[in-house]
Image (cartoon, rainbow, N blue to C red):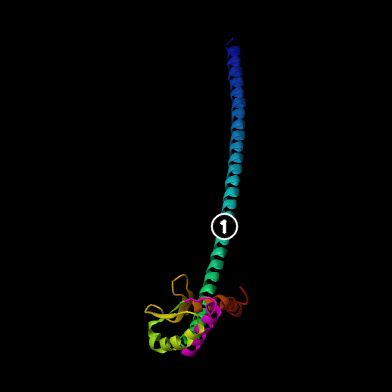
Amino acid sequence: MEKKLQELTEKIYSEGIEKANAEAEVMISGAKKSAQEIIEKAKKEAEKITSEARKKSDEIVRNGQSEMKLAVNQSLSEVKQRITDLITAKVVAATVSPAVTDKDFMKKIIETSIKNFFADPSKGMDIEVSLPAEEKNQLENYLKTNAKSLLNGELKVVFDDNMGGGFKIGPADGGYKLSFTEKDFENFFKKYMRPKTVELLFGGK
């Protein structure tokens, strides 16, 4: 009787162990499977993050290169413009300044302006010519003597302390004025010289 009880106990114990081992294997297998799934998921997530980071990095690099290229082009364009302006200004100033201080040249310009714009015998018009104050002794008597003969009206000569060179001319009633100051001549020549200067310096615009 005792022997049977012993056998029964061992059998129950053995079956319990086997069952526990089986359940343990199932649990371990499930844990391994879950762990593998977690690892795979983590790998995919890591790959996704890495891919997105790489794309973002590439985009930043492209944008940076684009911005750098734009900045370089703008800087180069600005440098070219400054060089062109400096050379143009120097050439124009060296040419215009002596011209507007040449008394004979200015006399011809003023007379030509009167002939072309105001010398209409059918219209009596009083004209006012504005000159730099420093030209008073040089041009006032000449204009009143010579230029007045071109007009069918009075010629008034005024002097401006703020005018650096050249002259302004128009009706004495102040309706409008044609300006031929040194600054006007400089701007005029700069406008037409600049494209040629750019072409000579840089081979085009």
| Residue 99 visible in the picture | no
Point out residue 155 in the picture as x, y percentages from the top left corner.
44, 81
Point out residue 128 in the picture as x, y percentages from the top left corner.
44, 77
Question: Farthest residue toward the top?
Answer: 1
Instruction: Give the residue number, with chain letter if any, for mark 1.
Output: 63
Point out residue 33 in the picture as x, y percentages from the top left corner.
62, 34
Is 122 colored magenta in this rendering?
yes
Towards the viewer: 8 or 20: 20
Residue placed at 61% from the left, 77% from the top? 199
Towards the viewer: 34 or 64: 64
Task: Determine the main secondary structure of the stretch shown in magenta.
Answer: helix
Is 191 colored magenta in this rendering?
no
Left or right: residue 187 versus residue 200 is left
Towards the viewer: 55 or 85: 85
Occupied quadrant, residue 35: top right
Point out residue 95 in the picture as x, y percentages from the top left corner.
51, 85
| Residue 177 visible in the picture | yes
> The N terminus lies in which quarter of the figure?
top right
> What is the span of residues highlighted in magenta in the rendered image?
102-125
Left or right: residue 23 versus residue 128 is right
Residue placed at 47% from the left, 79% from the top? 153
Q: Secondary structure at mark 1?
A: helix
Occupied quadrant, residue 28: top right
- The amino acid marked with disc number 1 is Asn
> The C terminus lies in which quarter of the figure?
bottom right
Q: Is residue 179 above or below residue 19?
A: below
Towards the viewer: 41 or 128: 128
How packed is label 1: few (under 14 Cα within 10 Å), some, or many (20 or more)? few
**What is the count of numbered marks?**
1
Residue placed at 56% from the left, 79% from the top? 116
Q: Is residue 160 above or below residue 11?
A: below
